[in-house]
Amino acid sequence: MYILMRSIFNLRALRDKGRQRVAVIIDKSTGVDATEYVRVVRPWQRWLSIEAVVTVPDSLAIASLESWLPAGCQAVVVVSEHKSLLHAVKQACDRRGLAFIDSSYPVGPSRTVSLLQEVAHHDFEIGAVNEWDGQPTKYSWCVLQELSYTHCEKVFPRYVLPYIEGFQQRRGGGPIETLDIGCGPISVLRWGMLQGLLSITGVDPLLDMYQIVLERHGLSTLPSIFCQRQLGIAAEDLRQYVPPSSYDFAFSRNAVDHAEDPHLLLTQVGACLRPEGVMVLEFSTREGTKENWMQLHQFDLYVNAQGTLVSETRDGVCSPLVSEESGLYLREVVRSDKDYTVVILERQGRVSDPLPIRDRIATAQSSLAGTRVSHRAGLFRGVYTGIKQRVKSFTQ
């Protein structure tokens, strides 16, 4: 993986330590431009101040380094793979009590490695170039649809519109408060924001890196490119940040099976939904098995022969994904086959409504254009798997 984004990924370790004053040393042989580095990290200005950037040869005298470091600097980032330079800077940082940030890959198989790979595949597809081998990416046409004001409607899950319309009737109009769990750099619900249908809170532990990705490619000023509210957290921690019963609608595409604890995730989301609120889950069926349990794919999710939505681990432990504690129940299976699954969960409880949502949408559900759902779901299954296959070996 390219060294610029590796160094920025490692730099994010400082984001929870208060405002940081940082110096950046760039090895000339990397080809990284100093001005570009400063531009790309601009979204982090709230907590990050780049005090100085210098481009140096692959060796640097320690005396020169120590005289160059700005006063008040708290950390030094080194964009280099030359051991001599890294060692010299590390020694100087140790003597002055400064944090040292290098550009190395995370060590060993870990969730951190998988998160870095997740950033890579989004960055490559948005930029249309696989920066590992320099070749064009295969599915950037799909990203262009997401970016298009006109054509982002094609990636929007239109089968949820009857639910949205029902909530709007109940609320007296206006955008519906929505959670997008694992929203990625560009929410597939963006069309709903542009149309004024949804007010979206995006939830993703990599949102800060996706800000960097979009800034890098010059896309951060597009209308509604970001969700109205952004929570850069794991969805398992949602209740620490979101009041209970504050949302009508939650959505997740190809994300729940990436969680460390899918059961806890649904419990957290369930608590944030109002009575009769719904959560829509889309995911590749048995993705853990398909991906050989690599990277973030540590669970198989599927609807079993008894019609139960279940989660199965690599060692064969199988349990219902929707627990009583979550307050959710499986309302509808929109699609369930070997390739893709789409289900709708509903929050238990009743609200004062003379015409419940389930009655208003019954007719609409019977004509949900199943071919549309199947076609789009199959498309995204292919896109997602293809992208992941291209980044599996980056840290090997």
Image: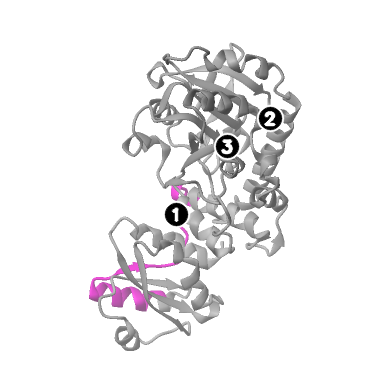
Q: Are marks 1 and 2 in contact (CB under 8 Å)?
A: no
Specify the amino acid type for callout 3: Asn
155, 351: nearer the viewer: 351
Q: CA distance from mark 1 to mark 3?
A: 19 Å
Which secondary structure lies at badge 1? Answer: helix
Q: Tell me the residue that label 3 is attached to.
A: 254
Q: Tell me the residue that label 2 is attached to.
A: 339
The residue range painted magenta reads: 86-113
Specify the amino acid type for callout 2: Asp
Q: Residues within 10 Å of mark 2 (few under 14, many from 20)?
A: some
Q: Tell me the residue that label 1 is attached to.
A: 208
Q: Are marks 1 and 3 in contact (CB under 8 Å)?
A: no
The residue at the point 48 percent across, 56 percent down is: 209
Whether residue 132 sits left or right of residue 84 in the image: it is right
N-terminal of the pair, mark 1 or mark 2, is 1
N-terminal of the pair, mark 1 or mark 3, is 1
Q: CA distance from mark 2 to mark 3?
A: 12 Å
16, 221: nearer the viewer: 221
Residue 318 makes an appearance in the image: no
Q: Is the image coloured rainbow, by chain, by secondary structure, or in one colour?
A: one colour
